[in-house]
Amino acid sequence: MRTLADRPAVADGSHGGTARRGAADRPASATVSRRMRSLKEHLVAYGLLAPAIAVFTVFFFVPAVYLVYISFFHWGVLSSATQFVGLQNFRRLVEQPLFWHSLVTSAYYTAVMIPATVLLALGIALVLREAVTARRGGVWRAAVFLPHVTPVVATSIIWIWIFNPQFGLANFVLTSLHLPALGWLDTTQWALPAVMIDSLWHSLGLYVIVFLAGLANVPRELVEVARLDGARRRRIFWRIIWPLLSPTTFFVVVLATVNSWQAFSQIYTMTGGPHGGAGGPAFSTTTDAVLVYQTAFGFDHFSLAAAMALVLFVIILVLTVVQKWISNKVVFYR
């Protein structure tokens, strides 16, 4: 028979309670340690992101919010007084034929640039992928990408000389091929196509590199199997390469759309000065971005320019949403 003396010492809860508390404290301390480690990682991450967030806040978010604000006011840089006018700036835009003309010009410019960019960039990327060896591939990619990193203003001045009607290289090539010389930047018919050629030359390298990156993700095994089965190049492209490139193509289309609607530097440089002012001749190259600049800094009507910029933002946003909706039906993600 067991007596009271034979009972375990843990009956009073001294040793057993200590053991249980120790076992319970270890998971709790581990949880606290993990939380502290996670907190430190988050603080380090936000600390590294802080400079970029500050730059975006100061130079993007705050000006964007302020642009929306002054579009509903009569506001000037040198005037401290502001007057709320509501939708009056937007009503004035609707009543201006030049504003509608600039929207049509921007739409035409974008409608031409998007297919031209996609077709040329994809074609050059396919040629580089097939014809360039691995040893020289980096050199050719750098050569194709080089125009994109050159200053737009400097290269646009060179293109002005190329399109000069009297002694430019473009008309020299045309006359050498027994074709009529063109007025280029001096005529309303060819001024905008000349700007498009400059824009294509300057931006094409970026899109070629993007397509090359997309082609690198296409499994070569699928292409080799299709060739062994007797499929021709055209069928391989449409049945294998093109569907797998649809995400890349969608990205290029969105990027080209935004860049085309916002095109300004090359238009302002190539159509300014002796050619009748930016957007000339006769407003044939006046896009919405050019008109925003002229309204703000040429006529000192910043509120009206802010309303134009807000309309431009809404147009680009709607186009992007529509493109995203279409991409959900046609883009293939593997």
Image (tube, grey):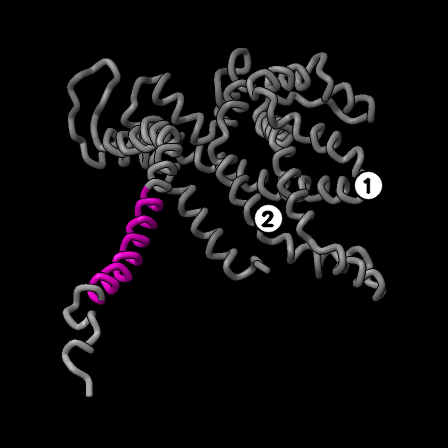
* Residue 19 shown in magenta: yes
* Residue 33 shown in magenta: yes
Q: Percent position (x, y) of residue 169? A: 73, 18
Residue shown at 37% from the left, 41% from the top: 41
Task: Tell me if residue 227 comes above or below residue 71 in the rendering.
Answer: below
Residue shown at 26% from the left, 61% from the top: 24
All told, the count of numbered labels is: 2
Q: Separation of disc 2 and disc 1 at Cα?
A: 21 Å
Q: Is residue 11 visible?
A: yes
Q: Percent position (x, y) of residue 209? A: 65, 38
Which secondary structure, mark 1? helix
Q: Percent position (x, y) of residue 199? A: 59, 29
State left or right for residue 108 relative to residue 24. Answer: right
| Front one among 161 and 187 | 161
Residue shown at 64% from the left, 22% from the top: 184
Task: Tell me if residue 137 comes above or below residue 11 in the rendering.
Answer: above
Q: Percent position (x, y) of residue 124? A: 72, 39
Q: Main secondary structure of the magenta part?
A: helix
Which secondary structure, mark 2? helix
Residue highlighted by disc 1: 131
Magenta part of the chain: 16-39
State left or right for residue 307 relative to residue 176. Answer: left
Specify the quadrant of the image occupied by residue 174: top right
Residue highlighted by disc 2: 248
Residue shown at 37% from the left, 36% from the top: 44
